[in-house]
Amino acid sequence: MTNYLRSSKFGHVECVEEPCCAKCDEKTKPPCDIGCKSSPAVEHVVLINMPFLQGDQEAKVLRCLYDLQFRFECVDALVVGRVLNKVENVTHCLFMRFPTLETLKNFYKSDALSKVLCSMAPHLHGEIVVDYVSSTGPLDTECKDPVCMSLTLLRRKRDVPPGEMDCSLFSLKTLADGYCFVSDFSFGSSLYICGDKHYTNAFASFTKSLCDLDKLLEDLQYTKLLHLKVLPLSCSTIHVNVLAFKPIKSCL
């Protein structure tokens, strides 16, 4: 296993990080061309509890989940990895992006998914599944460098209109999209296709390093908007930070 290095916010992680990059005012995001405009997508999120999985067994299970993107067509992005912050009954996370609702439904019926679930069954002690439609930009999860993700599931209060939550999350996305260290930010309302019926909304941010994820989560404007406009609308929340698993051969 890879040696762990300590990050100020996440504890131990399994990758070597470069020093923190320059501030945003010292570099700019590359301009988006027509091909990288935001487009609707369906996102599949699974929070998994596999508390006794470690070592080679963990690598094998994560590799099976990672390979789903090659066994099933129309997977636009995939992030799977260990949860870095302490969350009760959640140890790992899987995030998948599909172009349409139909492709997600076909994924649920696929033999590839059934085989992976069978291999996970002896280690699985619980899961939370949420599917939602979002408007997203491009997200490259096949590059050799790990992708870092911060994911939050929310249960909207009964007296809060769905539109109010959407507006608040859109404000959060607009702010995050303006940061050069944020690769992508998505949010949406649960489709209740399969799995958990408790959580009504979800949002996720993606960066290219833990250092960049630290920057976002410690940013004063982002934190203020999150705690003043988004979290007060929710009566239940789960937040996880994830460093993407990458097979050794993909890092060569």
Image (cartoon, grey):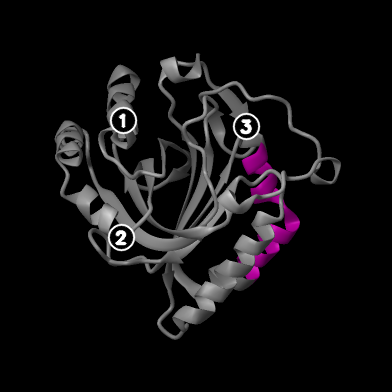
Quadrant of the frame with the N terminus: top left
- Viewed as shown, does residue 164 lie left or right of 45? right
223 falls in the magenta region = yes
Q: Is residue 191 above or below residue 7?
A: below
5 falls in the magenta region = no
Amino acid type, mark 3: Ser
Main secondary structure found in the magenta portion: helix
Q: Residue at x 66, y 49 (%)?
A: 216
What residue does disc 1 label? 67
What residue does disc 2 label? 101
Q: Position of residue 242 (x, y in %)?
A: 48, 39
Dot 3 lies on which element?
Answer: strand
Contact, mark 1 vs mark 3 (Cβ under 8 Å): no
Amino acid type, mark 2: Leu
- Viewed as shown, does residue 167 lie left or right of 43? right
What residue does disc 3 label? 7
Contact, mark 2 vs mark 3 (Cβ under 8 Å): no
Picture mark count: 3
Q: CA distance from mark 2 to mark 3?
A: 37 Å
Magenta stretch: give its range: 212-228
First in sequence: mark 2 or mark 3? Answer: 3
Dot 1 lies on which element?
Answer: loop
Q: Quadrant of residue 110?
A: top left
Q: CA distance from mark 1 to mark 3?
A: 28 Å
Q: Position of residue 109 (x, y in %)?
A: 15, 49
Q: Residue at x 25, y 63 (%)?
A: 193
Q: Residue at x 52, y 44 (%)?
A: 139
